Amino acid sequence: MINRLTEVNETVLIQNTSFSVDMLGRFICNTWDEAVNNGGLPFDAVVIGGGMYGAYCAEKIYRAGGRVLVLDAGPFLASEHIQNLTQMGLNAPSPARVFFNQDDPQTRNLVWGTPWHSAESFPGLAYCVGGRSLFWGGWSPRLTDADLAQWPTELVTYLAATYPSVEEETGVNPTTDYISGSLFQSLFARFQAVQGSVPTVTGIEEAPLAVQGAAPAPGLFSFDKYSSAPILSDAVREDVNPAAPTPDSQRRLFVVPRAHVVRLNTSGGQVVQIELYVNGQHQFLNLSPDCAVVLAASTIESTRLSLESFPTALMGRNLMAHLRSNTTVRIKRSVFSGLQTPPTQLEAAALLVRGSAMAGGGNRRYHLQVTAADVQGANPEKNMFRMIPDIDLQHQILANQDPNWIVITLRGIGEMGGDKNAMPQNAGTSWMNLTLTVPDQQDEFFMRRAWVNLVKTAADDQLWRSMDDATIALAQQLANNDPANIQYFYDGGWQPTPPPPSTNNRPNDPNNKVRDGLGTTHHEAGTLWMGTDPTTSVTDLNGRFHHVSNAYVAGPALFPTLGSANPSLTAFALARRTASAIAMPTVEAGFTPLFTGSLADWQMAGAGRFNVIGNTILESQGGIGLLWYTKAQFADFILKVDWRASSIFDNSGVFIRFPILGSSDPANDWKLAVDKGYEVQIDDRGYNPDTNSFGDALHETGAIYTFAAASRLASKPVGQWNVYEIQAQGNNFTVKLNGEVVSTLTGDGSRPLSGHIGLQNHHPGSRVQFRNIRIKPL
């Protein structure tokens, strides 16, 4: 049963079911018409996939000032990590092997689907806003220098500088979780004491978990397990401004669920149109030339969409995942020093063990994600990420801790090697491409599915064996090499001897006691890898396709190599880089930016104001007035300014070489800039206020107002960014608009040869935006 409630200022009514009011879905998501048919400016970016990296990247573009549309193929499920919602039971499903459509188990656990085909089993994707970030385990190790040895130097430097910010943002740093208790202190000391006895172990670290148990700063509420959904939801609500709802035409962030993109149509090496189905309805979205498209629908699906839309020979090669084993032991409590018996507090701990081993003639990395607790049973993570709101339940859990054993799970994660020369005909290496177009290989929109050929090579197997052996050796060292101090969990119970070495990674095989299947880690990566050379990589160092000028990728598909670390931290960092490349235009060598997000060096004269949007854009409001740069005066220079109009009726201008403002009549200060300086006009109508006429070249965009007529109207359509390049040298002036010279002037020497720079806000209702204001003295 669905009823409907009316909400003030909402064009679409809130759904009221028999059990709940869908406030979250209505307040965060939009219909297709609300997002694209609202009369607003063109989008600066369309992000395909509102999951872990898509939501993250979209939020960063929005925060920088961009107008963003997020298209997610699934519905809205939750605004928070599933484990923060207490006992929902919506974990990722078990892997399924889907060779043909007939093998597809269909949607599981509400939103999980299996979009690609393979001989390996995969859990699939979470089709919902927030995606797999709602289910993420939270492990966030950095890639080490050895992991990054084959990455471009510029990216290595960038990651080193960016990791701390992402760690702080996601809750990895400060490390307040599972490291302050007595169990952690004892466990950490014990691992450090024995690591030298296992040759392949290279280091012991605190657990880099994206789990925050304390407020990051005074006055801020803490969050628990990190997900990208809350930051996207928070940005949407800020954009809406519930206190004074923002019209859709002026909003900058829209999230449209159940919007399945099937193809990106290109022209001249640029994506010009997106083809998609929204709630089953076929739709097309034409893009502005300024619009970036970010593929963030997972490694496999983003690569599939690339192959369907603008394929190259390299796409789909270099496929990597991780080799994973799970070894659970319990060790006598008496082995660990500093623990009270029986325990007097909830004891849980986590740490990271780094390692490396020779495999296939080279060195490969692995790491062990170690979790430990004094629990009954074989799951030390049982209470680690769970919200426990009832104090009596906490006491009950404490009373049922095991006084004799510490249960430890050592989850091994090993690096798979990628093959950048892989060919689809070679079944012995990893790659992906598109399936045949026969019906049992098509999706519900009659598009080709991806075929994923993920295989374990001899070198992979060699590393896997070394990692598993090191895990057992390390566990035995923890137990003082005394069989009486350790038991191993496999075959459904605690055993006195270690599990026999696994000979394969097939699930449910009696010869495999600890290994997971290749496709179970959710860590597919590498198929659209970054590089500086278009002949040896698919995307550039900002994640943009070499051969498509406005298409980008967010996620582990960009990785040149994988390392052993969970890819999340690095993929978040790269998504920040991509968002910055999209939202913050490059400042050319020799130029200095005059506006970097703060108005500290600017002052308003006259009426109206300029609003700061994000940290990149200034937008005029009201007027007439002038926002002027107070920090310096400039004589000979080249000034570049990006600008765009929101309406044909907009009017503005860029002023140069006027004297300092600040008289006793602040309402009329701006007139001094008119009388003593020069204005480069922005008004496509060419309105002449003296004659009340239009089309006057002395008043048209590109003109040096009243001094030099514009030779032609070279501005782009409303809503697109234009670039002014204004050169002043002595009494000579040249104005270029979008690369074309549109006006020149040789002055008579009556006006100053040096002065300030300003931006005009002309009249109420005029909204002209400026960004990337930069100057180069001559």
Image (cartoon, rainbow, N blue to C red):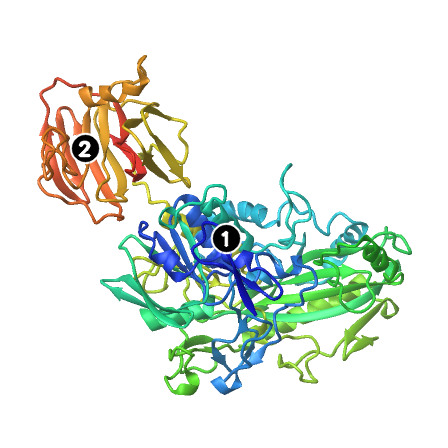
Tell me: 146 left or right of 400.
Answer: left
Q: Residue at x 67, y 79 (%)?
A: 502
Numbered badge on residue 680 = 2
Q: Is residue 623 left or right of residue 111?
A: left
Real-space Cα separation, disc 1 to disc 2, in angstroms: 47 Å
Q: How many marks?
A: 2
Kind of element beneath mark 2: strand
Circle 2: residue type: Val
Disc 1 on helix, strand or loop? loop
Where residue 353 appears, as percent x and y from the top left, is 67, 58
Amino acid type, residue under disc 1 in the picture: Glu
Which residue is denoted by mark 1 in the rendering? 7
Q: Residue at x 57, y 70 (%)?
A: 1
Do callouts 1 and 2 mark residues in contact (Cβ within 8 Å)?
no
Image spot of residue 475 (x, y percent): 76, 65
One can see residue 683 in this view? yes
Q: Nearer the viewer, mark 1 or mark 2?
A: 1
State the residue in front, 149 or 405.
Answer: 405
Check the image and report above or below for 35 versus 685.
below
N-terminal of the pair, mark 1 or mark 2, is 1
Comparing 178 with 649, the one in front is 649
Q: Is residue 565 at least partly visible in the picture?
A: no
Local crowd at mark 2 within 10 Å, few (<14), some, or many (≥20)?
many
Quadrant in the rendering for residue 87: bottom right
Q: Quadrant of the C terminus?
A: top left
Tell me where residue 273 appears, x and y as whole percent.
29, 64
